[in-house]
Image (spheres, helix red, strand yellow):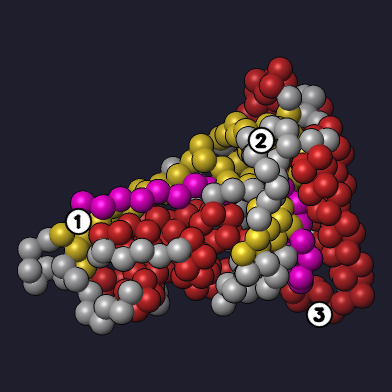
Amino acid sequence: MSSACAPGKAILFGEHSVVYGRPAIAVPVSQVRACATVEGTPPGSGLVIDATDLHVCCPLRTASKAEHPAYALATTVQHTLQRLGIDIAPDLTLRISSTIPIACGLGSGAAVATATVRALAQHLGHTLSTLEVSQLVYQTEVLHHGTPSGIDNTVIAFEQPIYFVKDQPIQLLAVKRAFWLLIADTGVASPTRIAVADVRRAWQKQAAAFEALFDKIAAIADQAAAAISNGNTAALGPLMNENHELLVRLGVSSPELERLVRAAREAGAQGAKLSGGGRGGNMIAQVSPPETQRVATALKKAGASSVIASCVEATAGPGSGWQAAPA
């Protein structure tokens, strides 16, 4: 049996504008993970997908139909086998489990795909580079989101904080001083594809206005990257607040998100904003350790279905880069 796991992710700054060539910052969230195991089965069994979270256990050929709930997972398997030069699916059982909430902006689909690619490659005796894994997962992200930026597959595959600009070299982001986040789930599913498509339609109607908003979000992301690299974590909360107000103007907040953002700030968080596609899903707040429990309690009272505490650990040395080739 072979196995692999992958973390969730949170976007700190730059969601939506990243689709239009602006920078974004994302961090892995290792407190939640997707795991895949692969084991051999008797000859003639074919490849079986067992995904308990999707309530699916079926042959690969069945899941390969577009309307099937495991279609994206089946497509990930097929893309991986093609990359490995395997024309006929081997006799295997692929089991998937995940503690990452689905459709909440924490990268569930990319994490499942990353774990799947790695477990399959390992079991079949192949070695894929991290960049190759990220490229394969990007193909799955297209199914999930339509026009993804490439940030989810990148941060999850590399499992390190990143500064990301679409179609430019991927930069690992050096973290000089650790900082803490609370990630609160509104309990409202929010498929990123829908929010991204809505923003695109609005941009097409009001290109100049939306480009100006994207530029302001980009400036915040650059300030945040400098603050993280320099250890000026006190600057991050106010920048989160600014970024959130711009996302509100993009039309991707919701009453549930606003309630949680307000609750976090009033309870002592240094800053708070929606994270990911918006319209539901998660919000993130920067907190200091003494404030963590108080803010988490306030978020739960305000309606959060769950709250995850996550530390963005300090890293050693400057960030490095790889050529981004997501497509």
Q: Percent from the top left, x then y, of residue 180?
A: 68, 31
User: Residues under labels 2 and 3: Cα distance?
Assistant: 40 Å
Sequence-earlier tag: 2 or 1:
1
Q: Percent from the top left, x then y, of residue 224?
A: 81, 47
Sequence-earlier tag: 2 or 3:
3
Name the residue at the top extreme: 290
Amino acid at dot 2: Ala
- Residue 293 painted magenta: no
Sequence-earlier tag: 1 or 3:
1
Q: Which label belongs to residue 39?
A: 1
Q: Is residue 15 above or below residue 293?
A: below
User: Residues under labels 1 and 3: Cα distance?
Assistant: 48 Å
Q: Percent from the top left, x then y, of residue 324?
A: 62, 69
Q: Residue at x 31, y 79 (%)?
A: 85
Name the residue at the front extreme: 317
Compared across the picture, whether 277 is left or right of 55 comes to right
Q: Nearer the viewer, mark 2 or mark 1?
A: 2
User: Residues under labels 2 and 1: Cα distance?
Assistant: 37 Å
Q: What stretch of residues is rendered in magenta?
A: 1-23
Residue 26 visible, this angle: no
Q: Secondary structure under badge 1?
A: strand
Q: Quadrant of residue 263?
A: top right
Q: Secondary structure under badge 2?
A: loop
Residue labelled with disc 3: 204
Residue labelled with disc 2: 314
Q: Residue at x 30, y 59 (%)?
A: 122
Mark 2 burial class by Cα count in 10 Å: few <14, some 14-19, many 20+: some
Residue 41 visible, this angle: yes
Q: Which label belongs to residue 211?
A: none
Q: Residue at x 21, y 68 (%)?
A: 47
Q: Is residue 102 above or below residue 168?
A: above
